[in-house]
Image: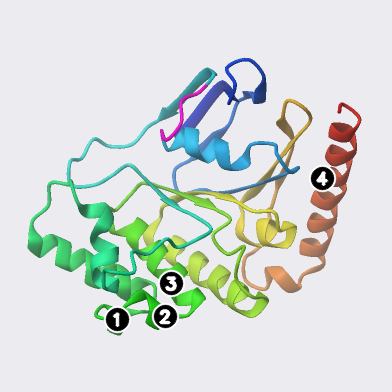
Amino acid sequence: MAAVIHTEDLAVSFDGETPIFEGLNIAVEKGEFVTLVGVSGAGKSSFLRVVADLIPPFKGSVKVDTPDDPTRRPIAMVFQAANLMPWRRVKDNVTLGLEGIDVSDAIKQERIEWTLDLVGLKEYGDRWPYQLSGGQRQRIGIARALAVDPDILLMDEPFGALDAITRTALQDELLRIWRETGKSVLFVTHDIEEAVYLGDRVLLLGDKPARIVAEYPVDMAREGRRESDAFARRCEDVRSGLHAAIKAAAGKD
């Protein structure tokens, strides 16, 4: 299957001299769910921003292979904070990403209704952000990203600020949405269990400058995954790899 994201010897530097990460060669296939974990400061969030064309690469290249369609955006991003505009109702927050896209008001309305229904908040369109819980606000952030009908969904620790119960529920909701939409997802998290539960494979970012030091396929059924022995073993594999990467990075300080 063809890759929708392909990076070649990618590097990012904030001072124009010292790379945060370098030599990243990553491919994400169409419809794949890839999770990324790594040591603190390895540039996980920066990597997503380069893919989203929010910051330029220092070296190397990023290729995004998606259809050219003026009624859609190829990439959408979900951040840790939902960042809803408090002066806009829920439905108007969802349409934020649609501004500047060549679609009619009727299609915008269809997308609002579709995405709100998809995230389970169909009746919340006229509410204000302050009337929502933290989990509901994050669902609206996901709806806003999906409203532009992207081929690729980039997610930067979107559940990191939520309580454990809400986080678990939204993980399941995200998997349902992913199955229904067929989007390609690149998901950054610091939570190993979350990475293994959600991902088709887990990439580990380590070393200094950072690079991909390990890749862990998660070749187990999603049904009952969290309760399986294979899940626990794979989490331990990733945890051991992360600890080794943290130790190696500390030795280079």
Mark positioned earlier in the residue sequence (3 or 2): 2
Q: CA distance from mark 3 to mark 4?
A: 31 Å
Bounds of the magenta segment = 53-57
Mark 3–mark 2 CB contact (< 8 Å): yes
Q: Is residue 157 above or below residue 57?
A: below
Q: CA distance from mark 3 to mark 1?
A: 11 Å
- Judge left or right: residue 65 versus residue 70: right
Q: Residues within 10 Å of mark 2 (few under 14, many from 20)?
A: some
Q: Residue at x 38, y 68 (%)?
A: 140
Under tag 4, what secondary structure?
Answer: helix
Q: Which residue is mark 4?
A: 242
Labels 3, 4: front one = 3
Mark 2–mark 1 CB contact (< 8 Å): yes
Q: Is residue 178 above or below residue 251?
A: below
| Residue 166 seen in the current view | yes
Q: Which residue is mark 1?
A: 127
Labels 4, 2: front one = 2
Q: Residue at x 65, y 63 (%)?
A: 221
Q: Label 4 sits on what residue type? A: Leu
Q: Label 1 sits on what residue type? A: Arg
Q: Position of residue 177 (x, y in %)?
A: 43, 66
Q: Position of residue 236 (x, y in %)?
A: 85, 56
What mark, if any, has residue 198 been given in the picture? none
Q: Is residue 135 above or below residue 194?
A: below
Q: Residues within 10 Å of mark 4 (few under 14, many from 20)?
A: many
Q: Which residue is mark 3?
A: 137
Under tag 2, what secondary structure?
Answer: loop
What mark, if any, has residue 132 been given in the picture? 2
